Image: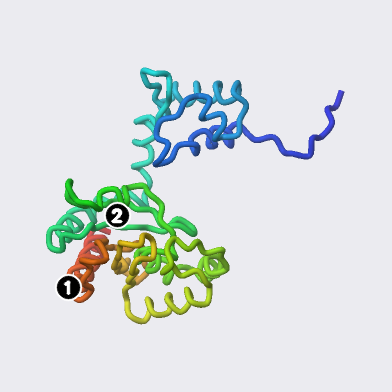
């Protein structure tokens, strides 16, 4: 007998497994089975079956209290991403030197569709900026200097999608209108760098320069972040520009 169509397509096994993995984020690194069921939108029995499969492969680890966290095997697989590993490895020593020279948090970001992804963040262990961002964090393109650099050099379709909004206003200084954002992007292309003053957090400012391939394409953005009260643009421009150029040159010479 043919079962009636519910009108809602059944989620594939892959979709359901991805929804379980997608339940984890920076604020939810450890989740119970009930948490995973609720956050993935899957029935408890289905979530239990998928979690067991992911655990047996190593994508999830089971903790002593019965909760789950992301497994090492999934992390190892993630490090193979070709856009991430070479860039992060190439940039790391330059970011460390940039942090030493400026005392600002130094990081590198790439674009993933309409978001930025931080590949590496270098800061002193006692610095107040330690909680600002971590490797793997996503950042909004319209609300930080690194994101503005990446968006300014993205395809027109990407710029149109972001500028069409809605643009979340993280602070009163965040660009929240598409027209104003387009003007900012034109300024970034004209000046060669981006500055964000209190646009993502009310007490934080940032500066970013593009990392370019041999043909001039923008691959990433090197940036520094510092408390707004201690942010001195004139002093930061030369070292951040030099670091972005050094990473670009390193990538070109290494192929």
What is the x, y in percent for residue 101? Answer: 12, 62
Question: Label 2, on which residue?
Answer: 87
Locate the C terminus and report the quarter of the image it occupies: bottom left
What is the x, y in percent for residue 36? Answer: 52, 30
Indicate which disc residue 235 carries: 1
What is the x, y in percent for residue 210? Answer: 32, 68
Q: Secondary structure at mark 1?
A: helix
- Displayed quadrant of residue 187: bottom left
Q: Earlier in the sequence, mark 2 or mark 1?
A: 2
Please state which of the two labelled residues, at mark 2 or mark 1, is closer to the viewer. 1
Residue at screen point 17% across, 69% down: 239
Instruction: Say left or right for 213 vs 241.
Output: right
Locate the N terminus and report the quarter of the image it occupies: top right
What is the x, y in percent for residue 115? Answer: 45, 57
Residue at screen point 38% across, 61% down: 200
Instruction: Say left or right for 54 vs 240.
Output: right
Pick the front one: 110 or 199: 199
Query: Alpha carbon of mark 2 to alpha carbon of mark 1: how far?
Result: 26 Å
198 relative to 131, above or below = below
Pick the front one: 66 or 93: 66
Indicate which disc residue 130 carries: none
């Amino acid at each position: 007998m043919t079962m009636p169509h519910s009108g809602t397509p059944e989620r594939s096994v892959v979709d359901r497994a991805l929804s379980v993995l997608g339940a984890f984020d920076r604020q939810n690194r450890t989740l119970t089975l009930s948490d995973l069921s609720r956050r993935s939108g899957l029935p408890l029995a289905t979530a239990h079956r998928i979690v067991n499969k992911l655990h047996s492969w190593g994508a999830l680890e089971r903790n002593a209290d019965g909760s789950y966290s992301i497994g090492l095997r999934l992390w190892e697989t993630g490090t193979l991403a070709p856009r991430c590993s070479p860039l992060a490895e190439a940039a790391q020593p330059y970011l460390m030197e940039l942090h030493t020279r400026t005392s600002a948090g130094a990081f590198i970001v790439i674009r993933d569709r309409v978001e930025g992804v931080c590949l590496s963040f270098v800061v002193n262990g006692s610095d107040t900026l330690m909680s600002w961002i971590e490797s793997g964090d996503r950042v909004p393109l319209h609300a930080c200097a690194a994101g503005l650099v990446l968006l300014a050099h993205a395809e027109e379709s990407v710029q149109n999608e972001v500028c069409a909004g809605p643009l979340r206003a993280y602070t009163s200084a965040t660009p929240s209108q598409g027209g104003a954002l387009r003007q900012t992007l034109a300024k970034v292309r004209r000046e060669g760098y981006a500055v964000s003053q209190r646009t993502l957090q009310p007490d934080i400012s940032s500066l970013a320069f593009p990392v370019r391939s041999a043909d001039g394409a923008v691959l990433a953005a090197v940036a520094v972040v510092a408390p707004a009260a201690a942010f001195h643009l004139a002093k930061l421009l030369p070292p951040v520009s030099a670091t972005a150029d050094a990473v670009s040159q390193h990538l070109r010479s290494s192929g």
